[in-house]
Image: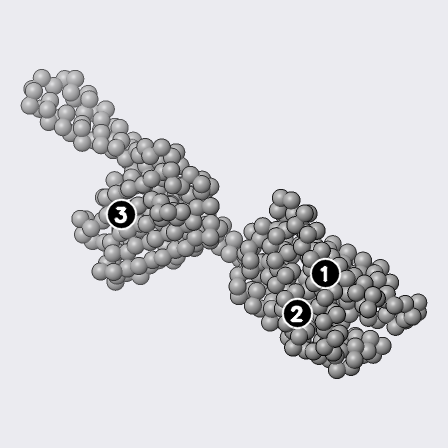
Amino acid sequence: MTALMINSGFVAFMEITAVFTVIYPIEKRKHYKLYAVLISIFFIAACIVQRIFLTVHDNSNLLWLFFELANFLFIGFLIRAVTPRGAAACMYLSVWSICLFQLAFTVTCLFQNREPFKNFSLNMLAVFPIYIPLYAFFALAVSKRLYMDRNMQITNRDLIIAVFTHFPINLFNHMLFNANNYDSSNYLLVFSTIFAYACCLFVLYLHRMFLRQAKLNEEIDIINELWQQRQTQYEVTSCNIEYINKKTHDLMHTLTELYTLDDSNLRREFLDELSTKLRVYDAFVDTGNRALDTILSQANLYCQSKGIALKSIVDSKTIEFMDVTDLFTVLNNALEHAFIQVLQVADPELKQVCIHIRQKGNLLLISVENIRNPAISISSDSDFRMKGISHVVRKYDGQIHTSSKNGLYKLSIIIPKV
């Protein structure tokens, strides 16, 4: 019984080691070492009790499956306590850890019945050196590649794929070993199990690389979109500068005429005209947030040159937590998406865009409303802008909703403030 407890404790220790081999490139929480030690001690004790319980009940497959699921959840909890990753990512890494450990454990079975280990009661402890190169190879050759993109999110779908890739193989191999009374001298059985776990790790690795490739493709789309935005921004800026220069030239001409004008009635007409022309400078907005002022002022100038009425109700303090680049991307794309649709409306009275930025509870709410022509489909340029918004909103764990009713199009963005 003592040998069983020591062997079981060492196996649990190597399973914990597999966990930290998988997650070592990831950023850690503050005081993570204390959490790791406390949880690891509890896990090792639980594994010893589990092994004794299974031995008493002749390694029942049902009990084994229950304990295996419990280990899976417990390892996920350990990773959650040590790293700042989300729950789905921690469970995903738990699958990787269990699969790596199972591969290493099965490899050691090749040596347990060979000299000098076969007559040693603490055979699992004796084959400890076998784990070192396996874990070192994984840590140096695989783990770093898994986290080349630290911002990649693990979704519930990715977790389900990982679970249903590994657990059927794990259950099948356990039933196979159990049916053969855990005869590790059967090298065909051991080699087939090693091959199964190696293939499982390879499939998980391919899945991870596919995720990374999809992420890179998405980033390429965003880069192309941002390039198109810069082109559009240059055209808008040029248009606005031309518009301001024209107004300035008109003002200079009006002032020159005022100097030589004696008729009071004509002077009043010229002053009224001058007042009208000075309204162009009302386009410059002062909200208290420099980035927001720039975006709305630029939009106002563009709207004045295109005959669009822009109405804004904004609380600048609600967006201070957002990165300036992200804010530009979201608001510029949302407004330009609205402008594209409004310009397709024939009635000048309906060329209006309304933007509302406010906070509700712990949520930032951004809404942009405009009239659109339902008969005209949304252009690919607008699709690119929506992708740009989606890319940023996902970064902040937010959501996007769009609705169109009676010709009124509304884009709503909800971002939690943390």
Between circles 2 and 1, the one closer to the viewer is 1
Q: Where 173 sits versus 131, above or below?
A: below
Residue 127 screen position, x and y as percent: 85, 63
Disc 3 is placed on an element classified as strand
Q: Residue at x 18, y 27 (%)?
A: 274
Between circles 3 and 1, the one closer to the viewer is 1
- Tell which circle, 2 or 3, labels the residue nearer the N-terminal end: 2
Residue 194 screen position, x and y as percent: 76, 71
Q: Amino acid at mark 2?
A: Phe
- Tell which circle, 3 or 1, labels the residue nearer the N-terminal end: 1
Disc 2 is placed on an element classified as helix
Residue 404 is at least partly visible in this image? yes
Q: Residue at x 58, y 58 (%)?
A: 89
Residue 308 quadrant: top left
Horizontal side of 149 relative to 411 (left or right) equals right
**Badges 2 and 3: C-beta atoms under 8 Å apart?**
no
Tag of residue 45: 1
205 and 338: which is toward the camera: 205
Q: Amino acid at mark 1?
A: Ala
> What residue would you read off at disc 3?
353
Marks 2 and 3 sit apart, C-alpha to C-alpha, by 59 Å
Tag of residue 67: 2
Few, some or many C-alpha atoms within 10 Å of disc 1 (few <14, some 14-19, many ≥20)?
some
